[in-house]
């Protein structure tokens, strides 16, 4: 995914200082230098990061299960929250910001300048802060005035999230972005939100769905009902989940069931916008061993690099799976004008790269996804080290003329790579 440099660079020393000051005020850090103390990191932070990583990767659990509440189960809940805040919050923040930057880069226009947004399973408000980062560093254009409802089952992490979001928004000059915390366990035996809950222009769920156990069909029905009642016309829903095969396939299953229900209920005003560029059957889901994910690379805060080194982790590149939907009857290219094709071209000529591109002789080989599904394709750039050879996962070919079938095809010509 193409992320603007301004966003890639936005998490350096200044961000670190902000994190350190906030974490001190919150009683996480003994002093401002603790983020660079080997002893402190090794004793109080890294063991909890390792534990959370194992938990999120379901290393000791049934891969198919949800997660039981973990914030209170820990022997040291304060350090567990600190570890999440220092490590998982910034990386999820960046992932969500990258998705915001993709919407912005493709030309999405928000319906209002005074927005209402909601993050469900908000934890420390990583998602809300990611949108704020996209607003500030990637021209998201969401509006200078708005309110975030943060819904979270754990009071302590919610309180941390509400305070952190307030502080982060203000540091970015978003002083008219407000936060309203809602301490509440979402019970999907019922609905996502109570009937009297308002409508939102932005509905965000970041690394939350994989924690609940509900089958994709039921989940699709619940979400469609929630969006019917609580998403404003022309509003957007963003879902971000792990890039792990099983969790990613669950998101693809959800997409499949959303599309089935949309067709069954003849819903006209809901579109899957990203990453798929169409409502085709998912090519990755049709193969048992396949799944779909994106990747973004950032300049990590200095302390974060240190944690990576000490914990033998590497979060320079952040993988994730995602889905963006719009509540709109407009066509894809009205919503994302950057994807407009030239006249006489059809949506079948819009394709996204869904893998890395590797050299095969004088060609580049990769997988493409478009309205006809997923296909293996090759392209011969003018020069293998020239500009048109710098293809990356997430790039979109416009007006592409392709020859061949889904196992072996070739891009003959295209207008541009977005
Ligand atoms: C992995 S964290 C994600 C936090 C944040 N959205 C992010 O991207 O970093 C998932 C959060 O969802 C919360 N959660 C899980 N099930 C929930 C439920 N049924 N109701 C409310 N919150 C829930 C958990 O307590 C946890 O804080």
Image: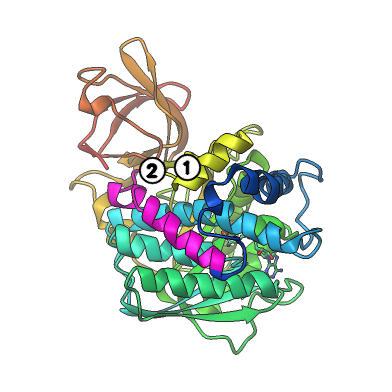
Q: Residue at x 22, y 38 (%)?
A: 416
Q: Residue at x 56, y 39 (%)?
A: 308
Answer few, some or many: residues within 10 Å of disc 1's Cα (few below 14, many 20 plus, some between 14 and 19). many
Q: Is residue 148 visible?
A: yes
Query: Relative to 221, is 175 on the left or the right?
Result: left
The percent coordinates of residue 289 (x first, y second) are 64, 32
Mark 1–mark 2 distance (CA, rounded to whole Å): 7 Å
Check whether the beta carbons of the residues at disc 1 and disc 2 lie within 8 A of each other: yes
The percent coordinates of residue 122 (x first, y second) are 59, 67
Q: Which residue is mark 1?
A: 294
N-terminal label among 1 and 2: 2
Q: Which residue is mark 2?
A: 1
Q: Is residue 313 above or below residue 136?
A: above
Q: Quadrant of the C terminus?
A: top left
The percent coordinates of residue 207 (x first, y second) are 60, 56
What is the number of the mark on residue 376?
none
Q: Is residue 335 above or below residue 304?
A: below
Q: Is residue 385 above or below residue 15?
A: above
The scheme the figure's colours follow is rainbow
Query: Relative to 324, is 255 on the left or the right?
Result: right
Quadrant assignment for ligand 1: bottom right
Of residues 99 and 84, which is closer to you in this image?
A: 84
Magenta stretch in the rendered image: 1-24
Q: Secondary structure at mark 2?
A: loop
Of residues 371 and 356, which is closer to you in this image?
A: 356
């Amino acid at each position: 995914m193409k992320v603007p440099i301004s966003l890639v660079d936005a998490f350096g020393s200044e961000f670190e200082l902000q994190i350190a000051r906030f974490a001190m005020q919150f009683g996480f850090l003994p002093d401002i230098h603790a983020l660079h103390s080997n002893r402190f990191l090794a004793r109080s932070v890294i063991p909890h990061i390792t534990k959370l990583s194992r938990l999120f990767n379901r290393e000791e659990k049934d891969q198919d299960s949800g997660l039981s509440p973990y914030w209170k189960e820990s022997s040291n809940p304060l350090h567990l929250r600190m570890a999440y805040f220092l490590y998982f919050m910034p990386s999820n923040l960046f992932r969500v910001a990258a998705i915001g930057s993709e919407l912005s880069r493709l030309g999405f226009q928000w319906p209002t300048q005074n927005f209402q947004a909601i993050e469900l399973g908000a934890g420390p408000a990583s998602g809300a802060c990611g949108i704020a980062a996209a607003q500030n560093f990637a021209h998201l254009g969401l509006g200078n005035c708005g309110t975030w409802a943060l819904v979270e089952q754990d009071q302590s992490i919610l309180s941390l999230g509400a305070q952190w979001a307030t502080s982060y928004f203000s540091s970015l000059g978003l002083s008219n972005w407000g936060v309203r915390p809602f301490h509440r366990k979402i019970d999907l035996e019922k609905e996502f939100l109570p009937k009297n809950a308002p409508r939102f222009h932005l509905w965000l769920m970041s690394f939350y769905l994989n924690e609940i156990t509900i089958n994709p069909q039921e989940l699709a029905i619940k979400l469609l009902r929630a969006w019917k009642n609580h998403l404003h016309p022309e509003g957007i829903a963003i879902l971000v989940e792990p890039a792990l095969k099983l969790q990613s396939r669950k998101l693809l299953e959800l997409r499949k069931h959303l599309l089935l229900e949309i067709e069954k209920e003849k819903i006209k005003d809901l579109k899957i916008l990203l990453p798929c560029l169409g409502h085709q059957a998912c090519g990755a889901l049709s193969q048992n061993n396949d799944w779909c994910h994106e990747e973004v690379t950032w300049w990590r805060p200095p302390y974060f690099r240190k944690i990576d080194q000490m914990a033998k982790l590497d979060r320079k590149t952040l993988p994730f799976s995602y889905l963006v939907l719009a509540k709109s009857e407009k066509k894809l290219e009205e919503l994302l004008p950057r994807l407009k094709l030239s006249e006489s071209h059809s949506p079948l000529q819009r394709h996204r790269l869904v893998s890395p591109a590797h050299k095969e002789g004088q060609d580049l080989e990769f997988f493409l996804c478009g309205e006809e599904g997923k296909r293996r394709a090759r392209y011969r750039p003018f020069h293998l080290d020239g500009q048109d050879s710098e293809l990356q996962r997430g790039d979109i070919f416009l007006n592409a003329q392709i020859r061949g079938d889904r196992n072996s095809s070739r891009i003959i010509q295209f207008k541009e790579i977005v």
